[in-house]
Amino acid sequence: MASLGVGIGWRPELDLTIERMGGVDFLEVVAENIRPGRLPESLRVLRARGLPVIPHGVSLGVGGAEPPSPARLAHLAACAQALDAPLVSEHLAFVRGGGIEAGHLLPVPRTRESLKVVIENVRRAQDALPVPLALENVAAVFGWPDDELTEAQFLAELVAATGVGLLIDVANLYTNQVNLGLPAVAALDTLPLEHLAYVHVAGGYEHHGIWHDTHTTTAPQAVLDLLTELCSRVTPPGVLLEWDDEYPSDAVLADELSRIRAAMAVPGQAR
C-alpha cells in the first residue's frame, strides 16, 4: 500500500484550518459529500500542494444481500479519478435491505453464509474501481446472535479470498471491546496486518456503559494505546484523525496529530 503519513479527514468546516495547518501528510474526504466534476476549491488547493486525498464511502453497503449499486460504484470510481487517489475506502457494513435504508453503519452477521455474499460483493466493487479498495471495521452497539466468527476472523478470511485492503479503525476496535466484549488486542493479533492500507483514530463518549463513536472529541488514551499496539506489529502506511462535528480550535487539532505521532513512535521501530 502507498505510504501516506499522518492525515486528517477533510470537512468543509475545517477547510481553512487544514490549509494553514502543518504536519498534515494526506487527507480523506467523504465521497458522498463531493461532486467529482466540481471539487471544493480547498481540495483543489490541497491537491495542488501534493497531498494525497482518499475518497471514503459510507453508503456502498458491501455487507448487504444485494450487490453494490453500479451507480454508487461509478461515483466512487469518478471520485478516485478526479482526486487522483491512491485508493478508495469503504466500510464492511450493512446499510440497506429491501429498499429500506438503515441510516447507520450496522455490523454484518459474521456467518459463513454471510461471508460468501460479502466476498462476491467486494469482488464486484474491486472490478468497478480504478484503484485498490480498503474496507473499514465498524463500531457496533450490538452483535448478531448467530455469529460464527469474530470480526477479526471474518476480515481475515475476506482478505484471504479477495486481497482487499484493510482500513483499521482503532477507535472502533475500542468501541467493540467496551460494548461487545471483543478484546481489541486479540483482534490485532488475528487481523492480516500485512494488508493494512491505513488507520483511523477518533474520539467519542461513554453514556450509561455504552461507548458512542461520535468523532466529536479528542481520542481517549486507550484508543492511542491501541494504535501503539498496532504499530508494534506493523508500520502503518498512514494514520488519519477523524473529527466530524463540534469542531475545536486549530490548536486542539494540531495537538491531536502530535498525540498520534507520539503513539506511533514505538521504541525500536523506525518511523
Image (spheres, helix red, strand yellow):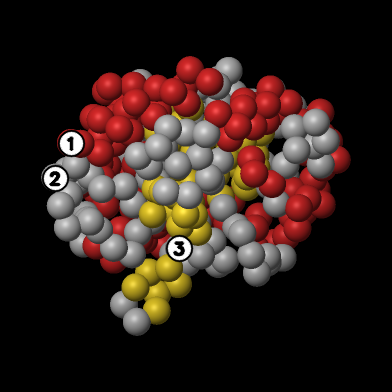
Q: Is residue 22 visible?
A: yes
Q: Where is residue 164 shown, x and y percent of the image?
A: 39, 25
- Residue drawn 26% across the image and 48% down it: 109
The residue indicated by pointer 2 is: 148
Where does label 1 land, which residue? 112
Splitting the image into 4 quarters, where does residue 32 fall? Answer: top right
For residue 127, above or below residue 69 = above
Position of residue 16 measured from the top left corner of the image (x, y, whole percent)? 82, 52
Q: Is residue 44 left or right of residue 249?
A: right
Q: Position of residue 167 (x, y in %)?
A: 44, 38
Picture quadrant of residue 256? bottom right
State the residue in front, 234 or 167.
167
Q: Residue at x 72, y 42 (%)?
A: 34
The amino acid beneath tag 3 is: Asp
Q: Nearer the viewer, mark 3 or mark 1?
A: 1
In the rendered image, residue 258, in percent from the top left (x then y), is placed at: 57, 51
State left or right for residue 73 relative to residue 159: right
Residue type highlighted by circle 2: Glu
Of pointers 3 and 1, the one earlier in the residue sequence:
1
Q: Which label belongs to residue 213?
A: 3
The local crowd at label 2, few if under 14, some if 14 to 19, many if 20 or more residues have their Cα within 10 Å, is some
Indicate whether 103 appears above or below 206.
above
Q: Residues within 10 Å of mark 1 (few under 14, many from 20)?
A: some
Q: Closer to the N terminus: mark 3 or mark 2? A: 2
* Mark 1–mark 2 CB contact (< 8 Å): yes
Of 213 and 99, the residue lying toward us: 99
